[in-house]
């Protein structure tokens, strides 16, 4: 007995699989949303995402919490460049999801990598680059709903409770109806 464990059939099957780079779903919020997938035409989330040749840069793919970057599309026929010129990109919504594995994908398999707006673009005869900046992060962190048991806050202190947060003093008041 050599002391080494033998591989199970499942482990051998996983080891034989091809290792692939992650795939990306890219949604650009033009007047008619444009949806692309870096792994070819792919059905996901009740949509068919069109094939694109796109390089992503930034986005905290290395594990950092940065949520900004650029999308560089190989745009030999000029379609992306035409959309950028005709409609502009400033403050138009953009979303990028990252996934591993092969289609068909469950709706929750891809994880959101960027959810924000486009900023600027640069086009030439063979490519179009769109910048996706980190913007309004402080504003987006503000609460967007009333804190009550209907919204999942069921352990609130009673009215009149005082507390300090971020260098400011707060007093909980009953909701006015």
Image: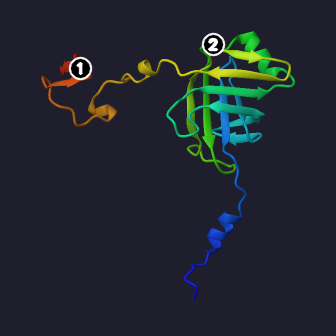
Query: For the residues marked 1 and 2, what is the alpha-carbon distance in whole angstroms?
Result: 35 Å
| Residue 13 sits above or below residue 54 on the image | below
Residue at the far left: name it.
Answer: 160
Q: Is residue 23 left or right of residue 107?
A: right
Residue 99 x %, y %: 62, 44
- Mark 2, Cα crowd under 10 Å, few <14 / some 14-19 / many 20+, is some
Q: Which residue is mark 1?
A: 167
Q: Is residue 121 left or right of residue 58?
A: right
Q: Nearer the viewer, residue 176 or 123?
A: 123
Counting residues from the start of the chain, the first of labels 1 and 2 encountered is 2
| Along the viewing direction, whichever of 106 and 8 lies nearer the viewer | 8
Q: Name the residue: 51% across, 19% down.
A: 135
Q: Do the numbered discs 1 and 2 sit on residues whose CB atoms are within 8 Å?
A: no
Secondary element at image label 1: loop
Across and down, in percent, residue 131 comes to 65, 21
The residue identified by callout 2 is: 90
Residue 127 lies, in percent from the top left, at 80, 23
Instruction: Please identify the quarter of the rendering in which residue 30 is found.
Output: top right
Q: Is residue 176 above or below residue 57?
A: above
Circle 1: is it few (<14), some (14-19), or many (20+) Cα within 10 Å?
few
Picture coordinates of residue 58, whole percent (x, y): 61, 31
């Amino acid at each position: 007995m050599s002391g080494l464990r033998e591989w199970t059939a499942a482990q051998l099957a996983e080891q034989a699989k091809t290792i692939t780079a992650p795939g990306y779903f890219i949604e650009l919020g033009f007047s008619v949303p444009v949806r692309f997938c870096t792994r070819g035409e792919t059905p996901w989330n009740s949509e068919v995402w069109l094939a694109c040749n796109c390089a992503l840069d930034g986005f905290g793919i290395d594990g950092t919490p940065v949520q900004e970057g650029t999308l560089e599309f190989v745009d030999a026929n000029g379609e992306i460049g035409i959309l950028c010129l005709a409609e502009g990109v400033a403050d138009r919504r953009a979303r990028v999801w990252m996934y591993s594995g092969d289609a068909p994908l469950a709706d929750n398999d891809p994880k959101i990598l960027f959810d924000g707006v486009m900023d600027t673009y640069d086009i030439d005869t063979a490519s179009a680059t769109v910048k996706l900046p980190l913007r309004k992060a402080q504003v987006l962190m503000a609460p967007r709903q009333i804190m009550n048991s209907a919204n999942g806050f069921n352990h609130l202190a009673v009215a009149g409770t005082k507390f300090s947060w971020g260098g400011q003093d707060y007093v909980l008041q009953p909701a006015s109806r």
